[in-house]
Amino acid sequence: MFRRNQASTSNGSTEPKLDADVTTPPHQAAGQRGNRQSVLPSYNHNGDKVTKHIKPAGESGRRWIHPWHFLRICFRSTCFASRCVNVLWPVVPAAIAVNYALPSNHLLIFILNYIAMVPTANLVGFAGQELARKLSKVFGVLLETTLSGVVEIILFSVLIKRSANPSGNPNGAAEGAEGKSAEGEGGGESEAHNLIPVIQAAILGSILANLLLCLGLCFFFGGLRRHEQRFDDAVSEVGSGLLLVAAFALLVPSAFSNALGDRVEMEELRSKVLNISRITAIFLMIAYFIYIWFQMHTHHGIYDSVLEEDEARDHDREKDLAKDKLTFSECAIALVISITCVALHVIFLVGQIEHIVESYGVKDAFMGLILVPIVEKAAEHLTAIDEAWDNQMNFALAHVLGATIQTALFNAPLVVMIGWGLHKDMNLNFEIFQIVMVVLAIIVVGNFLRDGKSNYLEGALTVICYIIIAVTTFFYPNPAPNGAE
């Protein structure tokens, strides 16, 4: 290696490749740039000195915290739609205040906290995006997707914590006694509502919202500005394959339950399905970590080059590069504030689901499959649609498919594991109607991704599929009480 480097230097024709966003100081002579690049500081497109280990596109040129800049940059957000969402921030304190001032007004608490989740989740997404700019492309996209998934993990965790076990708990009387004593501590909440059907519907609803609604809107709005948009096979094929595997794994417990429903006693069947779900969840999480290793280590270069090419095609690249950026400290503060607010709103929102379902006739399936995923995925959707609008389809696909893969391979198994630890019978035995809709959605989207091109027609068709599912779910009845078939 030493000889190869020495030969290339002696020829005088090869110079070290510099980052496209990095420049050297104006006073530095051209002949000195290659030799002194490691000594003299580098500057980004805005003339800011680039901090060590920070990517030039994410350099803010500032240190620590500047309150005015922090508020201005956060309100500006990533795009016009995100700025419109930030107008809803006054609802956030109102939602918290109403929860304590009017605890009996369940509908008002639900509506205000439902709305308040949108700007807070949007800030989680924006702070994650600002942090991702400072890191390598692949790691940045993965981190951004993971931070956006925190909203979903908090939601699932609160739901399973508040849920009661369905009747006929196969885990024995000891766990039932624990559950009753724990619920009894809450006074009036001794009769907890079984929220497991809502969690199951929310898992599948998150996948449907990403694949049909968000990806469809990406195809549609991106196609309005261009005849067609292209994306790389490295992003689409791996994502489609992983989703098919996830659909297969999520379908197995439901198929097992329905196949043996008439031949095995109900209590025994529930026990078997619960065990199958927990084992499946473990292997799904293993599959997710293998995927992360594949993307971050062994095939990192492929994804990095694809995303760099996509970034160069950004329609608003010059404008985005010129925007002010958050510092590391400001990113951390924004994440702490937004995640704290999201957690509060989720707790208040989940506390009202039982009243909304019982008092206003909202179905569990519609609540979990449609209403909950739309609000908790709002920030991811805005980011992906903005990227498609700016002709960054690989970035948009990375966010949409990455979030869907995280839900199917990590978040869903994680809530099964949490339920196991809390002695809750959280399983992957989904309603057949819901899981079939997810499998069909994955097949439809996979067919659209196969040719590596998209247009507004494909986007409109996927959104129409989502609307049809939403209408059908609105009329879908709740599960029979007491576990009756």
Image (cartoon, helix red, strand yellow):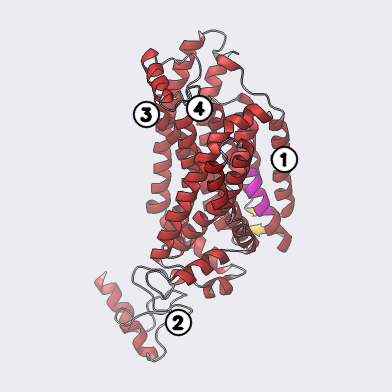
As measured in the structure, the alpha-carbon distance from the residue carrying label 2 to the one carrying label 1 is 48 Å
Q: Residue 421 carries which label?
A: 3
Marks 1 and 3, the one that precedes in the sequence:
3
Sequence order check, earlier mark of 2 and 1: 2
Name the secondary structure under disc 1: helix
Q: Residues within 10 Å of mark 3 (few under 14, many from 20)?
A: few
According to the picture, the residue beneath numbered tag 1 turns out to be: 467
Task: Tell me whether circle 2 and circle 4 mark residues in contact (CB < 8 Å).
Answer: no
Q: Are marks 4 and 1 in contact (CB under 8 Å)?
A: no
Question: Which residue: 46% across, 64% down?
Answer: 133
Q: Does the magenta stretch include residue 286?
A: no
**Residue assigned mark 4:** 428
182 to the left or right of 306: left
Q: Which of 154 and 461 is in front in this view?
A: 154
Q: How far apart are marks 2 and 4 (CA)?
A: 53 Å
Kindly tell me whether residue 406 is visible in this rendering: yes
**Span shown in magenta:** 210-219
Q: Distance between the residues labelled 1 and 3?
A: 37 Å
Q: Which of marks 4 and 1 is nearer the N terminus?
A: 4
Q: Which SS class for mark 4?
A: loop
| Quadrant, the C terminus | top right
Q: Distance between the residues labelled 2 and 3?
A: 53 Å
What is the number of the mark on residue 47? 2
- How far is mark 3 from mark 4, CA to CA? 16 Å
